[in-house]
Amino acid sequence: MTVNELYRELSRRYPPELRAGWDNDGLMVCPDADAPARRVLCTLDVTGACIEYARLEGYDVILSHHPLLFHSAGSVTPATVTGRRLLALVSAGISVLSFHTRADAAEGGVNDLLAEALGLSELSPFAEGVGRIGNLPEALPLFAFADLVRAALSCPAVLCAGEEKPVRRVAVLGGSGKDEIEAARAAGADVYLSGRLSYESVNEATESGMAMIEAGHFYTEALLPKMWAECLPVWFPGIETGYYHSCGITVL
């Protein structure tokens, strides 16, 4: 399978039409579209350390959730972080494929994985189809549910706001979800879980009776590249994969 064929097949699973208008995912870097895609490194972010690891370990492709380039690069020189990353990739002959908001909204994408990890059932979409809302098997006190989230996502801590009362209907949206708080409330959520929320929005939202949990941008989305690392060899026999933990944030 070539790099271009891999991109085409993954685009069938994560169609471009699901991509948000502001997003810029896709085939980010491709020194040779016809080069074989034998070894694929799956990660959330294409950092400099990730690129160096891919080079040393002989990976042909880096498959990421977050785009390497959110905006057009005015120049490509070693003077910028982005420039150094691009130059290193091209020099090593490594391609980068990124599937961002289309992998948030797609079936089996970030938010389905997040809902599955928490044991939610009877799922339905909200927030223009990106988020998911469903039910816990039984109602849990808010703080007990927060503990469940922390354990399920392997995150060091979560931020929890709201009254300590039972919750059962849960809305989830991985990554940055502060713009979808009203959509979660309108969908009937007892509690809204996202990766990153704003201080002001949490204070305002909890007065309405909906609890809020912030579990970290990385931890609410890392389920996707971990799943890729497991599933790509099944989807595309002959491909080898690895997973790179790209989070550089430490909770002290």
Image: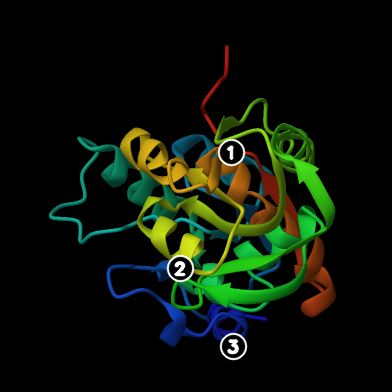
In this view, 113 is above or below 80: below
Q: What is the x, y in percent for residue 221?
A: 59, 52
State the CA–CA distance, disc 2 to disc 1: 19 Å
Q: Residue at x 39, y 55 (%)?
A: 68
Please name the amino acid that badge 2 sits on: Thr
State the CA–CA distance, disc 3 to disc 2: 14 Å
Q: What is the x, y in percent for residue 93?
A: 49, 59
Q: What is the x, y in percent for residue 94?
A: 51, 58
Q: Is residue 2 left or right of residue 149?
A: left
Q: Which residue is mark 3?
A: 12
Q: Which residue is mark 1?
A: 215
240 or 168: which is nearer to us?
Answer: 168
Which image quarter holds the N terminus?
A: bottom right
Please name the amino acid that badge 1 sits on: Ala
Disc 2 crowd rating (10 Å Cα; few below 14, some 14-19, many 20+) is many
Q: Is residue 4 left or right of residue 38?
A: left
Circle 1 sits in a helix, a strand or a loop, which is it? loop
